[in-house]
């Protein structure tokens, strides 16, 4: 099966590299011609037009930055299916809302192909190392055909159910990521205020009930105040928080911790700090003394 990959950002680049290094017959397309050229040098087929990638791929994987970009690429007049009427499997690894995933699935099915919502977790490090978690919703047969390629990029591959369930699972994960990041920042703001060394605090916290992966991840960033030039900027998490907030409303589920977290990240954005590391939320917490 020929594989096409669209989007070579912080996540997509590592994913595409792992597909290539694991033997996939890979074509790539992205906005940056330099990134396409670099992938050609590694052995991929570089596609400088979307049409070229579509016509050379049976399985098309997308990893894109936002909802509108996903919709344009998948359902737009000049999107993927405008260049082929052959049956294909289209996979969206982006983090979007459930309505978007279902809309994409309905459209792709109407064009005679199948769609999988398959968002990812693990961050740029997981993408680079091939240790991502990939949660998948949609056609089960298409999942089974795609699974060998998912396994080239991740270590935990789980079929969640019908269309939209992969996206729902990712948003549940992101709820915990957002709340745990905010809680970690709040705890470390208190640690600083109490004149306790963060390294010493972490020796205790890492073997205590208060430990979390987000605390482990955020502590050194906060300790060193390395908020700028982050591969995981607050902007990305803020986008997800907004989607989760709306999801709660749509499902009539009270999400009080997301409400509080959203207000903090809204403030971070208003202060033009959204490109700082997501652990930089401590800056807003510190201001609100």
Image (cartoon, rainbow, N blue to C red):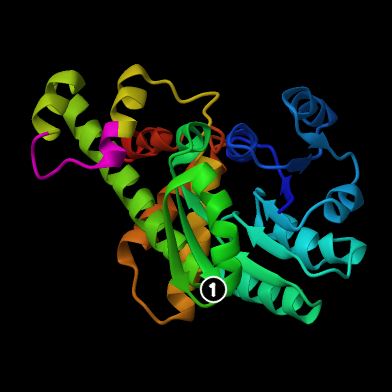
Q: Residue at 51% across / 55% down in the picture?
A: 240
Q: Is residue 127 left or right of residue 68?
A: left
Residue 215 point in image, percent of width and height = 26, 37
Range drawn in magenta:
207-216
* Mark 1 nearby-residue class (10 Å; few <14, some 14–19, many ≥20): some
Q: Observer-nearest residue: 165 or 15?
A: 15
Quarter of the figure that contains the N terminus? bottom right
Residue 6 visible in the shown view: yes
Q: Residue at 40% across / 38% down in the picture?
A: 281
Q: Is residue 213 magenta?
A: yes
Q: Is residue 258 magenta?
A: no
Q: Residue at 14% across / 43% down in the picture?
A: 210
Residue 289 visible in the shown view: no
Q: Judge whether 9 appears above or below 102 on screen.
A: above
Q: Return the residue at label 1.
A: 140
Residue 81 point in image, percent of width and height = 84, 66
Residue 69 point in image, percent of width and height = 74, 55
């Amino acid at each position: 099966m020929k594989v096409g990959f669209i989007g070579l950002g912080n996540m997509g680049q590592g994913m595409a590299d792992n597909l290539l290094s694991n033997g996939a017959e890979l074509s790539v397309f992205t906005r940056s011609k330099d990134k396409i050229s670099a992938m050609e040098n590694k052995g991929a087929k570089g596609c400088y037009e979307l049409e070229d990638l579509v016509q050379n791929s049976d399985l098309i994987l997308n990893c894109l930055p936002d909802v509108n970009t996903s919709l344009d690429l998948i359902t737009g007049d000049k999107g993927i299916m405008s260049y082929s009427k052959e049956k294909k499997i289209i996979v969206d690894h982006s983090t979007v809302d459930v309505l978007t995933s279902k809309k994409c699935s309905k459209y792709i099915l109407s064009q005679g192909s199948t769609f999988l919502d398959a968002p990812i977790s693990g961050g740029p490090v997981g993408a680079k190392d091939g240790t991502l978690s990939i949660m998948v919703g949609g056609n089960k047969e298409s999942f089974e055909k795609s699974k060998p390629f998912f396994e080239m990029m991740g270590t935990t591959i789980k079929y969640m159910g019908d269309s939209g369930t992969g996206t729902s699972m990712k948003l549940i994960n992101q709820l915990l990521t957002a709340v745990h990041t905010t809680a970690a920042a709040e705890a470390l703001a208190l640690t600083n205020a109490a004149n306790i060394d963060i390294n010493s605090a972490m020796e205790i916290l890492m073997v205590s009930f208060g430990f979390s992966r987000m605390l482990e991840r955020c502590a050194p960033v906060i300790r060193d105040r390395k908020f700028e030039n982050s591969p995981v900027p607050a902007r990305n998490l803020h986008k997800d928080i907004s989607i989760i907030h709306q999801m709660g409303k749509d499902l009539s589920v009270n999400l009080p911790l997301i409400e509080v977290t959203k207000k903090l990240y809204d403030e971070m954005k208003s202060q033009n700090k959204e490109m700082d590391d997501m652990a930089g939320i401590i800056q807003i917490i510190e201001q609100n003394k």
